[in-house]
Amino acid sequence: MSPMKTPLDSRLMGLTYLRIVLIPVVMTLTLSGSWGIAAAVFGVAAVTDFFDGYLARRWKATTVLGSFLDTTADKLLVAGALIALVEVGRAWAWVAFVIVGRELVILGLRGVVASDGTVMAPSFWGKLKANVQFVAILLALLRPAAELGPLLLDEWVMALACFVTVMSGLEYLARHSSALAGSR
């Protein structure tokens, strides 16, 4: 028998659903060149991720469905924003490939790890990755005219997001290598 859904669960899920609904809005605004509005909407979506996780932990209202939807919403938000930014020339395709590719690899790893009943807890690198990606996307949307050597500020931060994304993926793979070795 599954536990009854409380109004608290519904409010937390509402934050996740809001994030999902805002993805095509961010993409449309980005593709139309409405940079400031796209950045504001993306910022709201990113903040819902913070509050969703914070409140779920604080109120001990974490559920399997909520965790799945929260993680999925984050991945879709980042991927959608990056795809739109690549289209308008404000992000490199190779960075989008690395970030989306890492998410697919870790999604597969989660499935392997979950097959024996283990849950992949978020790591420091995973949390850092999400935050740096959010900042990089916000900066790419706003594109401040701050040149630092051969790149703009947002391009440096996007490269940093790519590096942290790779490090996060490697950390998860190393931490759960036994699950991969045991799945042969």
Image (cartoon, rainbow, N blue to C red):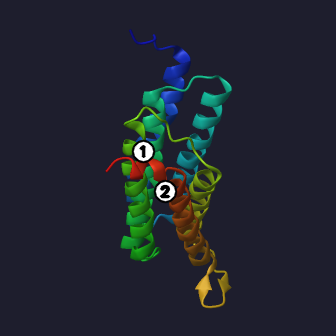
Q: Would residue 110 be seen by someone viewing this image from the given angle?
A: yes
Q: What residue sits right under mark 2 in the picture?
A: 173
Residue 87 or 54: which is nearer the viewer? 54
Q: Locate residue 17 relative to residue 59 in the image: left or right.
A: left
Circle 2: element type: helix
Residue 2 in picture, x, y percent from top left:
41, 12
Q: Residues within 10 Å of mark 2 (few under 14, many from 20)?
A: some
Residue 114 or 26: which is nearer the viewer? 114
Disc number for residue 24: none
Residue 162 or 91: which is nearer the viewer? 162
Residue 151 or 164: which is nearer the viewer? 164
Q: Is residue 12 above or below residue 104?
A: above
CA distance for labels 1 and 2: 10 Å
Q: Locate residue 21 relative to residue 161 in the image: left or right.
A: left
Q: What residue sits right under mark 1 in the picture?
A: 110
Question: Residue at the bottom extreme?
Answer: 150
Question: Residue at the left extreme?
Answer: 184
Image point (43%, 53%), residue name: 106
Disc 2 marks which amino acid? Leu
Q: Would residue 88 be seen by someone viewing this image from the given angle?
A: no
Residue 3 in picture, x, y percent from top left:
45, 11
